[in-house]
Image (cartoon, rainbow, N blue to C red):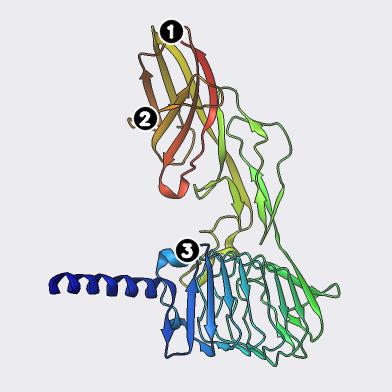
Amino acid sequence: MKKSILIFLCLLFGVCFTLNIKQTADAKGHIRYNLSEDGVLSFYGKGELKSIDHLINYEQKESVKMIVIGQGITAIKKEGISHYWNAKKVILPSSLKRIGENSFCYMESLKTIEIPDSVTIIGKGAFSDCDSLKKLVLPASLKSWKKGIAQDCPSLSTIKNRSKVTCHLDNCEGWRIWKVNGKKTRVLPKKKTARARGKKIPITYDLAGGKRTGKLPKYYEYGTKLKLPDTVKRNGYEFFGWYGEDNRLLTTLYYIDQDTFEYTNGEDDRIKLKKIKLTPCWFKFELLNNKEGTVQITLDGSKNRIPIVMYEVQYSEFEDMSSAYSESLLDVRNKKTVMEITNMQRGKVYYFEFKTREEREFERDSWMGKKKIQVN
């Protein structure tokens, strides 16, 4: 009996401890947090919010979609709420007075934030490296603006200064051009609004045996997302996407290429980029009736510079690819492979699609090149 009670108490303690870690935490009795199942991270209590007030693991951070700072919290200390890369919205209370250094840095999905008029101080790097941040409105109560609070925010195009202090504008190493009342500037005066545009970089194309079927963009503007069209074709080949001279596949051109725009040894590679040269990724995909009840599949990506690890093929009797079977083509040599699918029903029409498996950074998980064949 005593043993059973002891086991029950141990289990109960374990459950309570787990729930407490998952749902709330307490730092010196001041600030608590709650992470809901739908990704809302809420803070409540009184005083200053510090980074140690919420020891959240990687998976939990990844699940956060919105952050709510509750009434009673007066300051967000250094790196208090940073690296929540999937959080799209932040709600701040009217009790907040100070936003500390690097408080919201690396919030990659945050597009806009409304800072309440109670805030008087914003620390250096508070919104640095927020890739999606487009608009920042500074409160009328602001008394101190540290240089570089919004450093390396390539999408930032509008800063409205409602305060009486003059603010520094980051030009992303010359890649963003700020203007106030139509004049170029690096300083935002009090009670003014600054707007920015990114520099335009010319794009050239090597179609690698293909031809245009429509318009292709001539320029890329820094800080924007440019969707590259598939307005190219090549007889006997399937179009897969675009890649640049650095061999990275670009289905969507995002800040040209994230690797190109990383800081390396303290030097910004952006200053080296003068133009962009893009090449289409072509794949030859053929189906042949090799013998009775057998379809021979040929896949050839040898014209591309991307490294192919394997191909995958799916086939179905239905055009919508329902009830499809899939096969992995592992014997890839020189980016080419030939495979046979046997024991197929003669006289029936089958639909085939393929996709590639490359090195992780190139991987594109979508089927393409749908073809049909009637089996002999």
The answer to which image quadrant residue 117 occupies is: bottom right
Question: At numbered mark 3, what does the secondary structure look like: helix, strand or loop?
Answer: helix
Residue pointed to by mark 3? 62
Residue pointed to by mark 2? 329
Is residue 60 found left or right of 142 in the rendered image?
left
Is residue 300 found left or right of 213 in the rendered image?
left
The answer to whether residue 363 is seen in the rendering is yes
Question: At numbered mark 1, what does the secondary structure look like: helix, strand or loop?
Answer: loop
The answer to which image quadrant residue 57 occupies is: bottom left
Q: Which mark is residue 346?
A: 1
Residue at 56% in and 22% down: 319
Residue at 61% in and 73% down: 90
Around disc 1, counting alpha carbons within 10 Å, would you say few (fewer than 14), some (14 to 19), or many (20 or more)? few
Q: Amino acid at mark 3?
A: Glu
- Marks 2 and 3, the one that precedes in the sequence: 3
Residue at 42% in and 87% down: 27
In percent of width and height, residue 227 lies at: 66, 47
In percent of width and height, residue 65 lies at: 55, 64
Q: CA distance from mark 1 to mark 2?
A: 23 Å
The answer to whether residue 129 is seen in the rendering is no
Q: CA distance from mark 2 to mark 3?
A: 33 Å
Q: Decide: is 339 above or below 132.
A: above
The answer to which image quadrant residue 98 occupies is: bottom right
- Marks 1 and 2, the one that precedes in the sequence: 2
Q: CA distance from mark 3 to mark 1?
A: 50 Å
| Nearest to viewer (mark 2 / mark 3) | 3
Question: At numbered mark 2, what does the secondary structure look like: helix, strand or loop?
Answer: strand
- Quadrant for the N terminus, please: bottom left
